[in-house]
Amino acid sequence: MSKSAKAFRNISEVSDWLETPTHVLRFWESKFSQIKPTKRSGGRRYYRPKDMLLIGGIKQLLHIEGHTIKGAKQVLREKGLNYVVGLSRPLDLEVYEKDVELENSIKANIKAASLVQDEKNISYASDRAVSSKEVPEQPGLFDFFE
């Protein structure tokens, strides 16, 4: 049974959700003051959904868009927290995985259609090349007796 969308997640769950190592999450926490997980006994971190979305947006800025930490901080300052949160992947993994599966299926279909089209183009070009060559007339069987 999956957790509620409002449930707190531990660092391992956030790490799995983002496919990002836990040490990277801790590092980002030290660099971005906006990331404030709740810490319980023993220093265990628990992330609220809004923390997760912020981290997801930061990952998008750093790993996908190629910003430096300084650049990501500037985006946070200039465009605001809501903008960065909006860059994150959705919290509902099932919906996200279905979206990724659909996207992969579409890409595979486009690639297959492209290959079929390429084969048709090659076949057409080949047929045109053969039909455009003039075949020399062959002497008939009785032409030698004339």
Image (cartoon, helix red, strand yellow):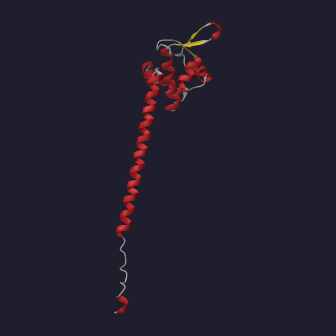
Q: Relative to the observer, which residue lies in front, 119 or 32? A: 119
Q: Nearest the camera: 108 or 70?
A: 108
Residue in front for this viewpoint, 127 or 99: 127
Residue 134, located in which quarter of the rendered image?
bottom left
Q: Where does residue 140 sit, x and y in percent of width and height? A: 35, 84
Position of residue 43 measured from the top left corner of the image (x, y, whole percent): 63, 10
Whether 6 is drawn above or below 86: the answer is above
Can you say whether 19 is above or below 124 in the image? above
Above or below: residue 21 compared with residue 45: below
Which image quarter: residue 136? bottom left
Q: Residue at left 37%, top 85%? A: 141
Q: Position of residue 80 (x, y in %)?
A: 44, 20
Indicate the quadrant containing the C terminus: top left, top right, bottom left or bottom right. Answer: bottom left
* Residue at the (52%, 21%) spot, across then down: 55
Q: Residue furthest right?
A: 42
Q: Residue at x 63, y 6 (%)?
A: 41
Residue at left offset 43%, top offset 36%:
105
Q: Residue furthest top?
A: 41
Q: From the viewer's perspective, is 124 left or right of 72? A: left
The location of residue 127, given as percent across then percent down, is 37, 63
Residue found at the very far bottom of the displayed protein: 146
Asked which quadrant contains residue 78, the reply is: top left
